Image: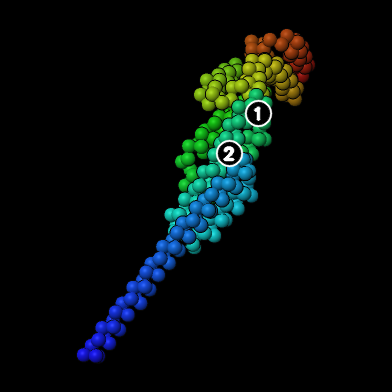
Amino acid sequence: MKSLKLILIFLVVLGVVVGAFLLIDGGGSASIKANADASYEEYRQQIARSWDELGDWDEANYAKQCNLVKQLQDEYEVEATNILALQNSQTALEIVHKKIFEEWDKADCQESVVRKYNEAKNTIRASHAAIGNDPNLTSIESVYATYCSALSLSKDKCALSTGFNGTSWNNFSAHHTKKIKARNEMLANSNYKTYLSHISSIKQGLNSFESKLATAKVDFYNKLANSIKSHYQNKERNYDNKRLLSSAISKYERESNNSEKKKELRRFEAQFENEVEQALGL
């Protein structure tokens, strides 16, 4: 009987010990989880604070936060670190979006500043594939493509090479039509009208297309007249070449308004004809 009582007492004590152990262990696990959650939240806030304090794009800070997330991959679940990485990229991209659109909003918008923030966008995109569909990124890329086209167009001098081959040359009238069409399409572009139309350098460049084309036309026909003379200067003096020269000059006169060059070409034609007659002994 006494042995039975001792066994019962032992079992009771054992149960108490085991129960206490389980309680302590359970509390410890909960405590560890709570500490982990608090630590994760601190990292999240740390990333947010780093960008708040800067208020601008900083490649070194972006790299620093990316490295921090990589270091946490062994400590937290993949999903958790992915969220931190996305937060870092999205926050940086929000700043880049704000800054580049602020620059586009200026009449004296600086090309170097725009390119700086576009390169920042490229850095973010390259380091975080999941950011590819972010609306801030897609809007930057859309407007930037229009900006580059408008900038290039505004700097276009509208020049055209003669393309002279002895009998024909490039069509300046078609060139004029093509350039004006490109300019008008840009003026009608929704991105241009909404974000870029007030940028002084671009606006002036596009508005001066008619005058640039007028200058380009004068230059084109000056060079063409010189090309005609240069081409036939070295040609054999015979009737075939005289005929080709006369045909080229007639075509030139129909297209060009440059009276001085027309006279110059007619004098050259007369000289060429005399030299043909001399060569033939006429």
Residue ID at (58%, 18%): 180
Q: Residue at x 56, y 36 (%)?
A: 97
The quarter of the image holding the C terminus is top right
Kindly identify which numbered label has been placed on residue 109.
1
Image-based side of 11 in relation to 75, left or right: left
Tag on residue 96? 2
Circle 1 crowding by C-alpha within 10 Å: few under 14, some 14–19, many from 20: some
- Percent position of residue 93, x then y: 55, 41
The amino acid type, in three-letter code, at marker 1 is: Cys
Please give left or right for residue 53 compared with residue 89 in the image. right
Q: In this rendering, would 186 be left or right of 276? A: left
Q: Which mark is residue 63?
A: none
Q: Residue at x 75, y 25 (%)?
A: 234
User: Could one spot residue 152 in this view of the protein?
Assistant: no
Compare residues 111 and 81 and report the one nearer the observer. Answer: 81
Q: Secondary structure at mark 2?
A: helix
Q: Is residue 156 left or right of residue 45?
A: right
Real-space CA distance between mark 2 and mark 1, rounded to the nearest whole angstrom: 16 Å
Q: Pick whichever, 199 or 65, lies toward us.
A: 65
Front-lying residue, 146 or 182 = 146
Q: Secondary structure at mark 1?
A: loop
Write the residue at 31% across / 77% down: 15
